[in-house]
Amino acid sequence: MFGYAGKILEVNLSTGKISVLKFEDEILKNYIGGRGLAVKILWDRLGKHWEKINPLGSENILLFLTGPLTGFFPGARTCVSGKSPQSNGVVGSTIAGEFGVELKCAGYDGIIVTGEAEKPVYLFIKDEDVEIRDASHIWGKDAKQTVTLLTKECRELLEKRFPRYGTWKEPSILYIGPAGENKVRTAVVAAKWTHAAGYGGYGAVMGAKRLKAIAVKGTRALPEVADMEKVKQLTEVITKKIYKKELWRRWGTASSGYDVGAKTSSEPVRNWQDEWHNQKSYGVDKFENRFWVKHYWGDFGCPTTCMKIAVIKTGKFKGAITDNPDYELQAYLGTNLGIFTPEENVFLASLIDDLGLCGIQTGNVLGFAAELYQRKILKKEDLDGLELEWGNAEAFAALTKKIAYREGIGKIFAEGTYRAALKIEKWKKTNVLKYAIQCKGIGIGAHGIRSGEDYPINISYACSVQGGDHTSIACLPINDLRSELLMVFHDSAVYCYFNTFGIPRNIKFEFYKAVTGVELTENDWVNVKALRILQLQRAMLLLGGPDKKWKPKEHDDNPPRFYEPLPSGPYKGKTVNRENFEKDKKRYYEAVGWDENGVPKSETLKKLGLDDVDKVLEKIR
Amino acid sequence: MVSVEKRIWIARDYSKCSGCRRCEIACSLFHEGRIWPEASRIRVFMLIPGVEVPHLCVQCEDYPCVEACSVKALSVNQKTGAVIVDKEKCTGCGLCINACPGKIPHIHPTENYALICDLCGGNPQCVKVCQEGGWKALTIVEREEDYSYKVYARTVEEITKDLTVKLYGEKGEELI
C-alpha cells in the first residue's frame, strides 16, 4: 500500500533471531498503523492469555510503530506500545522526533521486540543491516551521556563501514535512562534528551528486556505516495494556517503554566488539593526571558515548533537543560509540588529527563507522597530522612533519584501512584487510595474537570481506555473532536495532533487518502474502525492482570478528590456532580456499545467482526 | 574573470535552526521528487540535541572541490556560482569531499554521484521554507565580491562544538 514501507522488523532478544514480516492490506486498512496496529498485534499474539502476561516479563511484546502519515503529515512521531505495566491494558504512547522517519527510510513500518536479552544490548539498524549490539558500556548512563555516546559510536560504525559516503548524519535514537533499566513503572522511552513516550510506562518494559536503545539510520526515500501533488497542497494548507498562530508557536503550551491555573482553574496544585493559583512568578515570560536559549524547536516537518530549550547557566542549578518545560511538566513538576519558581521547575524537569522518568507520572507520585507527608501518614523517618514540604525542590529531587534507582522509600514509589498507594495502605493500615489522583493505574494528566472550563469532561478519564492519559479522553458525542475515537486516528496514522489545531477536521482524512490512496470517511472511522480498535483496547484493559484487574463499577470512576469542591479561585465550590457523572457514564457505555457493567456487548463485538474477543470476554461478563 | 551579476549566497544562522527539517523535505522534493532526507543537498545534523546544524555548500571562492575532481565532473554555474555535478561523469570517488574544508558533499544514497547544493538554479527551496516558517536560519543575501566565503565551509563537528557552548554554556563544554 502507498505510504507504507511494507515490512515490519521483528527481533527476538532471547534467541537473537531477526526476521521481517508483512501485513495484509486489509489489516492495514482497518488498523492503519501505530496505536491501531499495536492493539491488533497484541490481541492476536497475547489476547487469549492476556491476564497471565507480565508486562515486565519476557513474554510481553514491545512495539515501535509508525503510520502511513509519519513523515508526510507535518510533525513526525512514533508510537510505542505493548502491555502496559501501569494499566495492564494497552496504551498507544507516541513520541516526537525523527525516529519514525528514519525507520521508514530504512524500509520498515515498525519494530516488534519479543523476549529478553541476557545482558544489556542495543539495536542498530542501517537499512537492511540489523544487529543486536552489546550495551554494557552505556547501561547505567543518563540521557545526556547515552545520546552522546551512542551518536558517536554509531557514526563511527557508519564511517568505518561506508567510508566513501562522506560525513554521516547521526542516526535517530530511542533509549531508556536508569529508571527504565530499573523497571520503574513511571519510566519512559525517550529521544533527544527531552522527548518521551510517557504514558504506559514502556521504559520499564524496555528495561525488562535489557534493551537500552534502538539507533536507526535509513538512507532510502520515504515510501511512494498515491498523490504527491495533493500531499504538497495539503501540507501548504496546514503550514500556512499554523504559521499564523504565532503565540502558539512562540510559547507552545508553556504559557499554560500560569493560564490554566489562573483562568480555567484546572491545574494540579499540591496534589490536586487545589486547581487554582494566581502566581505571576510562573508566567511564561519568566521562563522565556530567563532560560530559553532556543525559542522555536521542533521535529521533522513541524511548522509549530512548540518546543523551547531551557538552560540554567548560573546558580545552584547550573547545568540543567530541558525543553520549555511544557505545560504538563510545569504543572506536575511545579504547581503540583507547590513549586512556583521557574528555576526549580526547569531543574526538576532536567533531572526527570536525565533519569528517563515520565514528568507527569513521576510528578503525580511525588505529589501523592508529599500529601501523605503533609497529613503525617508518612513521616521524615519513613522517607529516609526527607522533609517533603510543598515547594522543597531539593527534597523532591532527592526522592526522584530514589525512585529512579529503587533505593529505600523509592522502591515503593517506583511502582507508580496506584500501586504505591496499595502498598502504603497495607503498611500504614489507613486509606490513602483517596489521595491517589489516577485512573486505572495511570496518573491523570494536568487538566482537571472540576471547574468545567478545561477541555476534558466529567467522564473523560474514568471511561478512557488509556485511563488518566490527557491525550486520549472519552467524550460525548463520540465524534467530538476531543474524543479518543478521533485521537486514535492521530496515534494510528502517527503524527502530531498539535498540527491539526484550527485545521478543518476533514483534512486528516484527505491527507490519508493522498498518501495511501484509500478513501476514509469520518463516519466509517469513528463508528467502525476506531470503534473496533477501542473495543480491543477495552477488552485487554478489563482482562488486565496479572497483578491487578479493573472492575468498571469500581474503577470507571474519577479519583475521590474530583468530587470535593474546589477550595478557591473563580470556580470555588464547583465539583463533579456524582449523579450527572453516572448518567453520562451510562450514556457513554451505550454510545460505544458496552453493557451496563461497562463490558463490550456481544452484539457490538460481532457487528465489528470481533467474535473471538466476544468469546474471551465471556469470563468477565 | 567572468562577470557575475548579483549572485546570491545563503547566509546561515545555526542557532535559529528549529530542527524542523522542512529544508530537507523541500530540497529532496525539488531534486528527487520524493521526501528523502539522505538525498537532500542540505542536511540538518544534530550531533547534540538542540544543536541543529543545517549543512550545505558555501561556494568557496577557489572551489577546491572542482579543482580536486579528477574526471571533470564538477563545474561552476556561471550565472549562480553554484557547483554543478555531472551525474554521468561523476564516479562517486569522494575526492571532492576530501577537498572540501567543511566535508560538505556526500554521495547519493542509491546512485553513484556526489550531492552538492546547486542553489536550485538561483531560487533555493530550503531558504523559501525556512523564511515562510519565520525561523530565518537560512537567508538569501547578495554575494559580495570582496567577502570571504570559504571561511564558512566548516565541518559539522567544528560548528557543533562552538554552538554547543553558545547554547549550553559551561555545561556545553562538558558535553563536547
Image: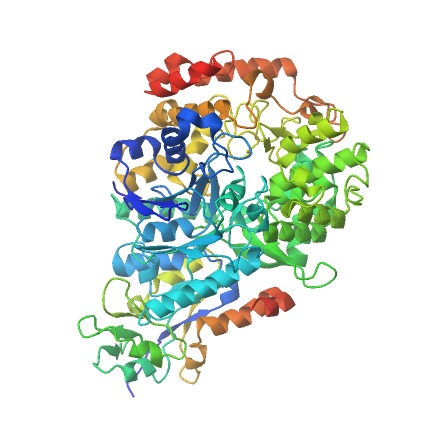
Q: From what the image shows, is residue B40 above or below residue A80? A: below
Q: Quadrant of residue A415?
A: top right
Name the side, left or right, on which A42 lies relative to A471: left
Q: Nearer the viewer, residue A174 or B11?
A: A174
- Position of the N terminus of chain A, as image quadrant, is top left
Q: Residue at x 41, y 19 (%)?
A: A616
Q: From what the image shows, is residue B21 above or below residue A357? A: below
Name the side, left or right, on which A501 lies relative to A410: left
Q: How many marks?
A: 0
Q: Nearer the viewer, residue A165 or A473?
A: A165
Q: Where's residue B132, x and y in %? A: 43, 56
Q: Where's residue A495, x and y in %? A: 42, 43
Q: Quadrant of residue A581?
A: top right
How is the rendered protein coloured?
A: rainbow
Q: Residue at x 47, y 58 (%)?
A: B19
Q: Is residue A548 visible?
A: yes
Q: Where's residue B176, x and y in %? A: 55, 69
Q: Residue at x 38, y 62 (%)?
A: B126
Q: Nearer the viewer, residue B49 or A436?
A: A436
Work out which residue is located at the far left of the displayed protein and give it: B88
Q: Residue at x 71, y 45 (%)?
A: A399
Q: Is residue A324 visible?
A: no
Q: From what the image shows, is residue A612 above or below residue A338? A: above
